[in-house]
Amino acid sequence: MFKNIVAKKEVKFKDLEEEFFKLACSMVNEMFKTVLEKYDEEIMNTRDSSRFRHKGKVGTSIKTKTGLIEYERVIYIEKKEDGTTACRYLLDEELGITTVVGGQVLEGLIQLIIKNISEMSYRACSRMIEECTGMTLSSVAIWNIIQSLGIKIAEFEEESIKAYEEGKLEKGTNETPAIFKEADGIMIVMQGKDRQKRINEFKRKHPNEEVPKKVRNGELKLGMTYEGWKEEGKNRYKLIGKEYVAGFMDGEKMAEIMKTKIYTKYDVSKIELNVTNSDGANWIKRLVPKNGIYQADCYHLKEKITTNVKEKEDAEEIIKMYWNEKYAEMIEYVESLKYKYDWIEPDMIENMVSIMEQHQIDFAQCGLI
């Protein structure tokens, strides 16, 4: 190998780096194979032979950060107390080897894929895996892994919801006086069978109506919970205890998932304040528990002001009052606008006054005023 490199007219450091990387991965994989098979032999010698019957060795492969490792491990027939039998790979169980679509993949490689797939395409992630590890995974293989993990997460969430409803879910122990929620939706242009299925279903129910955008597209719902925030620097804050929920689901489903996550993480009897911030979408109201607070966040409140107030100067004055926490003055000022803008719809003014009053109550309950 080294003679071939030196024989080249022009040798680049990158060429040497790649050759040494391949060599290192090859050596590690051989060591990995030896350790796995020796460990399997140790399990074989120390097992309960009356319970686990040796049925020979079966070859397999496992995808790791250093490449593909091929090895053999023993398959056992387990004799259960009820008289039934089952096939078992004790080595896999002992080491916690994760099986996903596309073969057995070690947790380290899966974590590497998850970490990068949110920031790049499947093809780019495939190239990154090949460049940074000794493993070659196609973009389709990575897609299959992500889909398989998504299915497992969905199954776990359904099981957690069912256990919660049956009173079998283990309670959390963390204590916090407050829980904050934020939620929003992103419209995604649907493609393929999913898009056509939604369109056909709408046409079947509404044959004489035009298919609206919300049917042609799908809304990806995003939700987050956290305990509070702490200052890390000037005008820089960090959220504490962040948890995320995301998917194509309705508000009811997201509420169930969030509720079970909070229940398993916290001692809910210690939570005194439960605040939900949003842009005012109806589905987000389902996330608000009994006696919880529901309010528009600062950004969307400012947006509602600039959208509904005709004159820029008036909008800026209301926003100035808002930042200075002069909520009572804000309500009076908005009330006065219906006399200034005699063209404005009464419902619009009532809606804005309602928003202001709601914020005054919410900020007071939060101890911010």
Image (tube, rainbow, N blue to C red):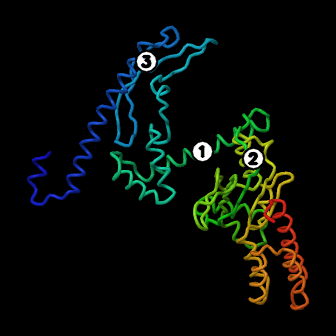
Q: Earlier in the sequence, mark 2 or mark 1?
A: 1
- Rendered location of residue 188, percent (x, y): 62, 65
Residue 243 is at least partly visible in this image: no
Which label number is shown at residue 279?
A: none
**Label 2 to label 1, Cα distance in Å?**
20 Å
Say which of 223 and 229 sits in front: 229
In the image, residue 309 above or below residue 262: below
Say which of 268 and 135 sits in front: 268
- Rendered location of residue 366, percent (x, y): 80, 59
Label 1: state its secondary structure: helix
Which amino acid type is shown beneath numbered disc 1? Ile
| Closer to the eye: label 2 or 1 | 2
- Rendered location of residue 81, percent (x, y): 62, 11
Left or right? Give the position of 135 relative to 75: left
In the image, residue 38 above or below residue 151: above
Tell me if label 2 and label 1 are in contact, CB under 8 Å: no
Which residue sits furthest top? 50
**Label 2 to label 3, Cα distance in Å?**
42 Å
In the picture, the quarter occupied by the C terminus is bottom right
Which residue sits furthest front? 234
Say which of 193 and 71 sits in front: 71
Which residue is found at the position 72% from the left and 34% from the top? Answer: 170
Which amino acid type is shown beneath numbered disc 2? Lys
Q: Which residue is mark 2?
A: 259
**Label 1 to label 3, Cα distance in Å?**
32 Å
Which residue is found at the position 79% from the left and 53% from the top? Answer: 274
Q: Which residue is mark 3?
A: 43
Which label number is shown at residue 151?
A: 1
Label 2: state its secondary structure: helix
Q: Earlier in the sequence, mark 1 or mark 3?
A: 3
Left or right? Give the position of 80 relative to 10: right
